[in-house]
Structure formats: C-alpha cells, structure tokens
Image (cartoon, rainbow, N blue to C red):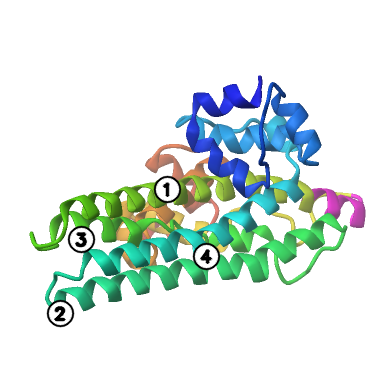
Amino acid sequence: MKMAELVESDYHLLKILSRLGIGGSFAERSVEEICRAASLSADTFILICSVYSSPDFRPTAEMLRNCSLCDLLTYLHNSHDDYVNRELKSLAESLRELTLPCTVTSRNVIRKFFDDCSNGLIRHFSYEEQVVIPYLRSLMEGKRRQDYSIAVFEENHGSIDETVSDLKNLIMKSLPRECDDALRARVLWKIFSLQEDLLHHTYIENSILVPVARLLEGRNEAGADGGGNGPGNDSAGVLSRREEGVLKLVAKGLLNKEIADALNISVNTVITHRKNITRKTGIRTVPGLTAYAILNGLVDINSIE
C-alpha cells in the first residue's frame, strides 16, 4: 500500500508518523519504501497502526516475533514527550481560558484536578522512561538485570486514562453556563482525543511491549543457562504475586469492583489480571479457577463459601 493511501484510510495515523519521525511528501512511495528510508521496521510500523485503526485488533505470535523492540521504544518515548510537552500543555492553556468566567472556587477546583491528573500522567511516563525503557535497552544488549523483569512492570501497570475521563465528565456536567460553549466543545474534543490515545498507548504496552520483552528475556535466559526456566523467567504458566492475589479473591467470590477495592487498584487492572490468569492457566470459569486455587494451595477450601 502507498503511504498516502494508508493515511487517507485513517487520518489518526498521522500522529504515529510524527512520533516515528516520518515527514515530508509521501509522493507515490509505498509504506515499505518510506519506512526503509527512515530506517524503521515496516512490520513494527504496521503493527502500531493496526492498534489505532482496528478496534478488535489482536497481534499474532508472528507479528510479535517480527516486531522491532528498538522502534517500539522509540515510538513510546516520543509518545511520552508528545503527551507531556504538547498535549497536556495545550490542554492546560485551554482549560485556563475556559474557566475564566467561573467563580474562584470552581476555577481552582477544576485547575487543581487537572494539575493532579497531569502530574499523575507525568509520574507514570517518568517511571517508564527512567526504569522500563533502560531495562529493555539493556536486554537488547544481551544484559539481564536480576532485580527486575517485565513482569514487575506488567504487575504494576494499570490504566492511565481514568482521571482524564473524570476531567471530561466534570467539563461536560459541572461547568457553569457562563463558560463559552464553543471553547468548551474544543476542550472536550482535546480530552476525548487524549483519552482515546492513552487507551491505545496502554494497549500497545500491555499487548505488544510486554510480550516482545518476554520473548527477549526468554532468549537471554536461554543463552545464559541453556534453557528458559531461570528464576527471572516469566513462563506462560506461572502467576505473578499480584495475579495470585487476584485469583484468591476471585475464588472467594468477590466481584471485580470488590477485588479492586480490596487491593487498592482499578477495575481495569483487575480485568487485565484476570485475563492474564485465564491465559496462563487455561481456565475461564470462576468454579474452575476456584478449584485451581484450592489445588495449588492458594486458598483453604474451608474459606470458600
């Protein structure tokens, strides 16, 4: 496919081009030709585009094997920079203008909520920049830290769009009539777009970055000890500590919201853990998972109602 035709099919992909440093005129060049000129993996570029263009997209094992971790990290790093230095700053300026007609109290509440939301996102991205990305770059160099693995990132990686969603609802439902309607619509457009982009960003990290990192960890382990079962290896059938904690509560009959409250995590994170538990155990029903938990000594049968 020609690059111009690809962008014509979904203009949202322009954001991906920008983050990967692809610019200029496409002319009649194909996706592969433009990626080659930019020293990028066409497979990785198409993989990222597919997440944005296809709501039901799920990467295959072959796609993950062909993915360039280097190009993926470039995309994620540039996405972080884009969020922090462009999108959040632009949204802050628009919110300041939008809330000028509000009372001092309302204005301060909205701005404080946005600042907290923004700072939370920045902390999230900073952790990935300072810990996760350096770890993965060391993996690409054949080095494996003993005190960290991609399972640690996965276990603590929750949804990052929830406070953005709350901000959206505050703007839609709680701002006074005095606020300019046209400006309110533009601000909401920015928030909707940011929330959608953050959902894609999270999906790329959970469903592409994590599996690709696991493959690389497995290769490094195999090179170190002749097998893939070293202590740092996250094999497909081994539950993380957090997943075991979620499974225990599932076995005790708690619902997702109750599990989230008990573990102080989001419902979306609970759902992600439950998907991982099902993937690793091959068991889909609550009774089956309960039996698994009992048989593996995670819960006492007497504690099950």
Earlier residue among tags 4 and 1: 4
Using a 10 Å C-alpha cutoff, classify the residue at mark 4 as few (fewer than 14 neighbours), some (14 to 19) or many (20 or more).
few
Magenta includes 12?
no
Q: Which numbered disc covers residue 206?
A: none
Earlier residue among tags 1 and 3: 3
- Boundaries of the magenta span: 218-226
Q: Amino acid under label 2?
A: Thr
Q: Which numbered disc covers residue 170?
A: 3
Task: Give percent across and percent down for residue 133.
Answer: 69, 62
Q: Amino acid under label 1?
A: Thr
Circle 2/circle 4 CB separation < 8 Å: no
Q: Observer-nearest residue: 79 or 182? A: 182
Q: CA distance from mark 1 to mark 3?
A: 40 Å
The residue singled out by tag 4 in the image is 85
Q: Observer-nearest residue: 9 or 74? A: 9
Q: Residue at x 87, y 58 (%)?
A: 141
The residue singled out by tag 1 in the image is 290
The residue singled out by tag 2 in the image is 105
Q: Amino acid under label 4?
A: Asn
